[in-house]
Amino acid sequence: MQEVKIRIRRSEPAVSNEVRYQEFTVPVGEGMVVLDAVHYIQNNIDPTLSVRWNCKAARCGSCSAEIDGMPKLMCKTRMDTLGKEITINPIKAYPVVKDLVTDVSHNYEIAKKIPPFTPKEGLKEPWTMMQIDVTRSKEFRTCIECFLCQDVCHVIREHQSNYFGPKHVVKIAALDLHPLDSIDRSELLHHDGGLGYCDITKCCQNVCPEEIRITDNAIIPEKERIVDHAYDPIGLLIKKVKRRKW
Amino acid sequence: MEKNMDKSLTWFPPEFKELNWRLWSFAIILILSAGALILYPVSQFEGYVDPFYSPTVAVIPLIALFRLSCYAYRKDYYRHVFRHPIACLDGIRFDDNRKGYSGEMTFFSLQNFHRYFLYIAIVILPFFYYDIYVSMTYISGEFIFRLGTIILIANALLLTLWTFSCHAFRHLTGGHTDCYSCKTAGGAKKKFYNGQSYLNRYHEQFAFISLIVVLAVDLYIRALIVGWPIDFTLLKFAI
Ligand code: SF4
Ligand code: SF4
Ligand code: FES
């Protein structure tokens, strides 16, 4: 069996300020993923190593970490795609609780600010809609809330701002593009959500394990909707004229 | 987390205050090439209209603004000129919290007028097709098909693909509506939007290939002027 060296960042801020990288040697078998290796360490070398996970099937979004500097799910990253020496860090955009476990609760605060699905008035049950209209927002519903996109986004990682972050734009786009929803959340994104801070550099889209085309399909369309009501005088004029009943 | 930088926002973006050789070398290259275009104009040669002069050199600033506000180019220069961030991988991102950042909140919120430059570009686009026609019929009573015409056709097609794969155009064709099957009869709108979305996937590629081809056409015509014998004729007859 092959052996791989794994460096893991260890810390527990509530107890001490100490941060250290600990190296473990792990035997690697066929089909093994990074989470397996971390479990091997927990079970055989150091049971105090903390990691959060639930499904080991890339469904729950718990095991986000930075593997060799790239935000990834540990359960979806095969060991044979990596080298002989691997470094695992907790996701940097959020405060560490212990070792690889981070506190992502800031995202739940943001989520509370987003108005939920609000059906149009006077809809007759059962609601009918065309599949094609639902397809667009379906892409966003595959989001597993792993916050990898939030972690890689430089606006959140390197600059402080009120920007909600790509994950929340995905959520908003899912609601906004729904054919039976009645609210336009792009105004919220423009003001409280700070979408203007996003410079469409697409790192979020690069790391999304669900392969949601975050920037192309959620962020840019929301930006264009913001242009509609905040920047485009001719568009506004046309809308006004259209709204008038002749 | 939320220290709120909003207070520090001024119209002048902090990105321009960085010691950034990439930005200034980019600016110098732009100025030099603008100078070259003006000092050594080659508006046309043997029926070939230089793409920079189609329909007139006066539209260059508008086309330049269309390119500069295009989402594909924005991504590229925010990454490679301003390094916000240059790469997604930790350790080589070259972005950090000591660098000022305003994104598209202040000066760069002007990018939001991209759709107006799109409208202008759509108006200018037919001239490139007219140039193809001219290149084949510039001698009266004769039809001629040369290598240069093929290059002009490629140029026009790529410009068309780039222009119509634009994100602002996508918004126009269906992005603005929540129910894109409801509008217009026969699902025409739906089909159009889906087709456009397909092109849109390759928008970045079209953006850069079309730019390279425009430059190549310009160089091709310049090469002909200095006498390179590369423009062979494929077909020629009297009409
Ligand atoms: S495209 Fe926008 S949201 Fe996505 S990583 Fe870049 S700045 Fe962040
Ligand atoms: S959009 Fe993708 S990367 Fe972001 S939280 Fe959802 S699944 Fe994770
Ligand atoms: S353990 Fe559930 S996504 Fe990795």
Image (spheres, rainbow, N blue to C red):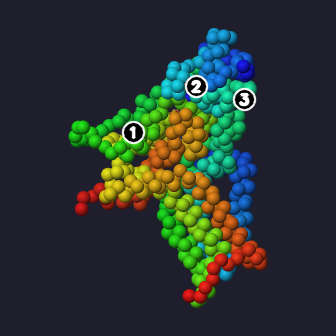
Residue beneath disc 1? A175
**Residue B26 visible to an observer of this rendering:** yes
Task: Tell me the quadrant of the picture where the C terminus of chain B can be found.
Answer: bottom right
Front residue of B223 and A100: B223
- Say which mark, if any, is on residue A75: 2
Labels 1 & 2 near each other (Cβ < 8 A): no
Q: Position of residue B78 (x, y in %)?
A: 63, 48
Q: Position of residue A22 (x, y in %)?
A: 72, 17
Name above or below for residue A135 compared with residue A44: below
Which label's residue is closer to the chain start, 3 or 2? 2
Residue beneath disc 3? A83
Which label's residue is closer to the chain start, 1 or 2? 2
Residue type for callout 1: Leu
Quarter occupied by residue A238: bottom left
* Discs 1/2, front: 2
- Tell me the CA gap for discs 1 and 2: 29 Å
Which chain is disc 1 placed on?
Answer: A
Decide if ligand 3 comes within 8 Å of the CB at mark 3.
no
Which chain is disc 2 placed on?
Answer: A
Which chain is disc 3 placed on?
Answer: A
Please tell me whether mark 1 sits on a helix, a strand or a loop: helix
Please tell me whether mark 3 sits on a helix, a strand or a loop: loop
Decide if ligand 2 comes within 8 Å of the CB at mark 1.
no
- Tell me the CA gap for discs 3 and 2: 17 Å
**Residue B113 visible to an observer of this rendering:** no
Please tell me whether mark 2 sits on a helix, a strand or a loop: helix
